Amino acid sequence: MRVITSEQVKAALELVDFVEPMGRALAAYSRGDVLAAPMSLFEVPGGETHIKAAVLRGGRRWSVKVVTNVPANAARGLPAAHATVTLFDVDSGQPVVLIQDDGGRLTGWRTAAVGAISAQLLAPPTRTLLVAGTGQQARLQVQAFASIQEFSRLLIWGRRTDAVGRLAAELRMMLPQVDVVAVSDLERAVAEAQSVIAATASTEPFLRGEWLRPGHHVTALGADDLVKRELDATAFGRADRVYVDSIAQNLEVGELRGAVDAGVLDAGSLVELGTLWMNPVPRKPDEITIAKLTGIGVQDLAAAEVVLERVP
């Protein structure tokens, strides 16, 4: 079995390499061309594990990704996330490729690429972008947004002042043309921004629907399990359009289910991003849009195929 290391992936690829493949993967999922196992979530000592598996109809390989997240690793000098993606031959069932994803770089890229697709399809012209979160995915989502459209001001909000400061310094180096500002008043920051990214591990909703105004777009991706929450139910109720990566999965994990149960969001109104990617709908200037992402197995399969194409 071939083994591809994290170092090989890092040397051969970058975020932009995954945007078009993620669009095709989302479209395949929405067309019904993907067979996927239900996402498995369980707690492990000190953290959590997610397992996702998928195969394309007629494809040559199917994938299984196992990713762990152990927050205490920061104190050990280790990345919080570790993952592997294993590809199996569809005919023999033999494992043929193992891709190491220490630090979650590959997972981060594929997630950020879907954020870029969300920005491309849904974000209004943005002068001020707000990101809530201070981790790897917050940084990658800002980079992804910057690959889609220019903005002049970036607001960064997080619960830890030191982490906000570190991310702000990092993004000032990456985006020298952007005025990067650390903020503490989230409500005011939402009012100033045209587009908002939520990329945290919060278990309590912090982005309130009453703060949203006509023209806002929100991409929310941190709440990807049974306990995490970023947006309150009112936010979904106020949105004119809500798009998801998977309707079925979003009705099982994340915060969207609570909005459906509260009666403020009709599950029948949800549209998958893959459908929008195939048939774009022009954005109305005064509408509120939300892209709610939980991550689906076909993204990992598509990301692994990109690695196979690009890593010698």
Image (cartoon, rainbow, N blue to C red):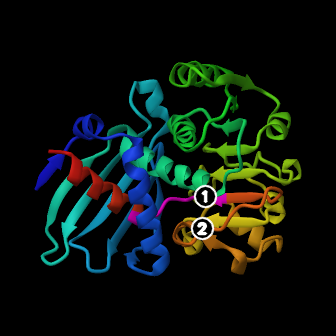
Q: How far apart are the two marked residues, 1 and 2, measured between alpha carbons?
A: 7 Å
Looking at the rendered image, the quarter that the N terminus falls into is bottom left
Q: Are marks 1 and 2 in contact (CB under 8 Å)?
A: yes
Image coords of residue 52 (percent x, y) = 40, 64
The residue range painted magenta reads 291-298
Judging by the rendered image, the residue that carries numbered circle 2 is 280
Judging by the rendered image, the residue that carries numbered circle 1 is 121
Q: Residues within 10 Å of mark 1 (few under 14, many from 20)?
A: some
In this rendering, position of residue 15 left or right of residue 7: right
- What residue lies at 53% left-to-right and 21% top-to-bottom? 170
- What residue lies at 57% left-to-right and 42% top-to-bottom? 145
Q: Is residue 34 above or below residue 9?
A: below
Residue 68 on the magenta segment: no
Image coords of residue 99 (percent x, y) = 24, 50
Q: Please tell me whether mark 1 sits on a helix, a strand or a loop.
A: helix
Residue type at the position of mark 1: Leu
Along the viewing direction, whichever of 194 and 281 lies nearer the viewer: 281
Mark number, residue 38:
none
Q: Is residue 94 visible?
A: yes
Residue 293 on the magenta segment: yes
Along the viewing direction, whichever of 215 and 98 lies nearer the viewer: 215
Image coords of residue 154 (percent x, y) = 68, 30
